[in-house]
Image: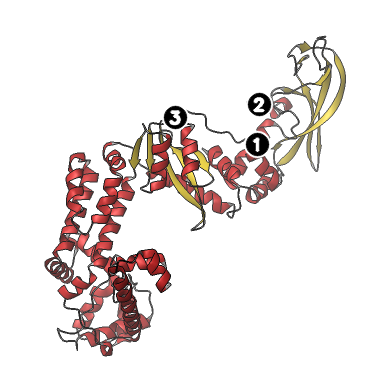
């Protein structure tokens, strides 16, 4: 059964077709409004008397891969209401063809969504392929013009910062946790800016945030009755970082417990010798700064006398700069058990070991395997009183927090030696385990005893921070809200910002993010 398609079905339904022309450049449709009267835009009274007519040219959606242009026969009407100031007016076509627009409403909507999804130049290139030629500036103007602010009532919000330029300039993002949508972008993360925005939304009852002090202070000032919720992921991450700091402060006792207190430079490789010489220079500076701190000098005065950065001086005073070999995770580490087995089997040649481990999936160079063979060969000449290579502080922290059934025999022996030689570190690890159990099991009653125990351990600084922010930490334990979805919106924001090469102003960035939602 054949069906026919009328020309009127291809244009907005408010219009009727008068004439149709096809050319190589596209399709031209002459149309006019279906109604015989029009409402005056000033007094809204219906008018029937036609003053004159003129042609209005408007672009419409393409048809069969060819651009479509509308020739709208637009009438001018006379308003017969004597008290109306407008005597002559042009008829309006409603949403089909907005006032003073050069595109139909449905084409404007498509262009708006292209701008939201792709930005300026990419959307312009794509629109040209769709037979809707439009410039990149026009696309961005449409996105800005059609931007709408959220007017929904907010109950639970999440707030976090994002970087316009990392370590230089930051902004703030506010999300509606109930609807999972971005609500507002703020130009900075200053307390005054956040306080002013929160004060305009007194209906907010839940504020989820990270553990930075700025947002907490702003929420307490603007919404004293609101419940603040610290992000649970940040709590767990801060606990892990606190334990890592405790391990770094305990590196000297750890080396004593593992019998690695004497370093013979003759047994070091070239790379290790450079690290060891740097360690000796650091130890001289550490001793000098520690002596100044023991004399009662403030960190600011020590910075002025030594010329070192404030961060470095603070690390020395806190005992966080004691590693001899600051090793990192290497590409060879997953293959060390296989190399040890080959070494024990009698293969001692570095090139041959490299060929064998390469067959197991190793992609590194022969130099790395050769240096490992050199260290292994020299280590067999070391006596018990000489150097025994120990892992970095980060590796020790990871091994101490893993379950014992996930460790090798050598790693288990090393962890046991550290726990026996440095009992304060073993106590800190148990406190970290207790804290993570409190967060996971929502055991709010165990938080206060944990803070009391942790303040007398290596985690005293972390425990003081938890006590200072205790209300938000309790909110994280008792409330179902979290800042995880806000972090996800930050990732989305970074994608859109980088898509525009970081040159978008705040209003355009906000328009694209809110419009896409």
The quadrant of the image that shows the N terminus is top right
Which element carries disc 1, helix, strand or loop?
helix
Q: Residue at x 33, y 86 (%)?
A: 351
Q: Residue at x 49, y 28 (%)?
A: 152
Q: Quadrant of residue 442?
A: top left
Quick one: 478 or 74, which is closer to the camera?
A: 478
* Residue 232, placed above or below residue 75: below
- CB within 8 Å, label 3 to label 1: no
* Residue 381, placed above or below residue 163: below
2 vs 1, front mark = 1
Locate residue 252 relative to residue 74 in the image: left or right: left
Residue 182 in sight: no
Marking on residue 145? 1
Q: Residues within 10 Å of mark 1 (few under 14, many from 20)?
A: few
Residue 441 percent coordinates (x, y): 21, 42
Residue lying furthest left in this view?
420
Judging by the rendered image, the residue that carries numbered circle 2 is 3
Locate residue 129 relative to residue 54 in the image: left or right: left
Q: Earlier along the polypeptide chain: callout 2 or callout 1?
A: 2
Q: CA distance from mark 3 to mark 1?
A: 29 Å
Locate residue 27 relative to residue 240 in the image: left or right: right
Locate residue 137 relative to residue 454 in the image: left or right: right
Q: Residue at x 31, y 54 (%)?
A: 237
Residue 496 in sight: yes
Q: Quadrant of residue 456?
A: bottom left
Residue 335 percent coordinates (x, y): 28, 73
């Amino acid at each position: 059964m054949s069906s026919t398609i009328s020309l009127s079905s291809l244009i907005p339904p408010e219009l009727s077709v008068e004439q149709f022309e096809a050319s190589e450049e596209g399709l031209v449709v002459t149309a006019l409004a279906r109604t015989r009267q029009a409402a005056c835009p000033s007094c809204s009274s219906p008018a029937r008397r036609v003053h004159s007519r003129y042609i209005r040219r408007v672009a419409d959606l393409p048809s069969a891969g060819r651009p479509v242009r509308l020739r709208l026969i637009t009438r001018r009407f006379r308003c017969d209401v004597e008290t109306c100031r407008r005597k002559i007016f042009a008829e309006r076509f409603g949403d089909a063809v907005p006032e003073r627009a050069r595109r139909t409403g449905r084409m404007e909507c498509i262009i708006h969504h292209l701008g939201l999804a792709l930005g300026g130049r990419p959307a312009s290139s794509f629109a040209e392929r769709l037979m809707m030629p439009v410039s990149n500036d026009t696309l961005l103007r449409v996105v800005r013009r059609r931007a709408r602010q959220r007017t929904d009532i907010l109950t639970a919000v999440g707030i976090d910062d994002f970087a316009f330029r990392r370590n230089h300039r930051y902004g703030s993002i506010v999300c509606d946790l109930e609807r999972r949508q971005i609500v507002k972008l703020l130009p900075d993360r200053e307390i005054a800016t956040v306080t002013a925005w929160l004060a305009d939304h007194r209906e907010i009852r839940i504020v989820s945030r990270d553990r930075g002090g700025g947002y907490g202070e702003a929420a307490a000032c603007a919404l004293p009755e609101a419940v603040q919720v610290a992000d649970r992921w940040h709590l767990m991450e801060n606990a892990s970082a606190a334990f890592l700091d405790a391990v770094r402060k305990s590196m000297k006792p750890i080396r004593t417990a593992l019998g690695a207190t004497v370093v013979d430079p003759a047994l070091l490789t070239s790379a290790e010798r450079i690290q060891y010489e740097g360690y000796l220079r650091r130890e001289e500076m550490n001793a000098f700064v520690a002596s100044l701190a023991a004399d009662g000098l403030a960190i600011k005065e020590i910075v002025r006398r030594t010329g070192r950065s404030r961060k470095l001086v603070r690390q020395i005073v806190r005992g966080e700069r004691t590693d001899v070999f600051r090793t990192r995770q290497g590409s060879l580490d997953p293959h060390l058990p296989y190399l040890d087995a080959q070494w024990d089997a009698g293969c001692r040649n570095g090139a041959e070991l490299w060929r064998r481990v390469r067959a197991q999936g190793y992609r590194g160079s022969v130099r790395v395997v050769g240096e490992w063979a050199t260290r292994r060969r020299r280590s067999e000449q070391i006596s018990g009183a000489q150097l025994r290579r120990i892992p970095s502080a980060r590796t020790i922290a990871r091994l101490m927090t893993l379950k014992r059934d996930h460790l090798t025999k050598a790693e288990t022996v090393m962890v046991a030696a550290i726990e026996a030689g440095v009992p304060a570190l073993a106590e800190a690890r148990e406190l970290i385990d207790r804290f993570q159990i409190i967060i996971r099991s929502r055991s709010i009653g165990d938080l206060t005893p944990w803070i009391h125990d942790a303040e007398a351990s290596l985690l005293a600084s972390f425990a003081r921070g938890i006590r200072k922010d205790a209300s938000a930490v309790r909110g994280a334990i008792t409330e179902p809200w979290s800042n995880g979805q806000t972090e996800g919106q930050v990732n989305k924001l970074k994608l859109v910002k980088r898509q525009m090469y970081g040159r978008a102003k705040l209003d355009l960035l906000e328009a694209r993010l809110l419009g896409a939602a």
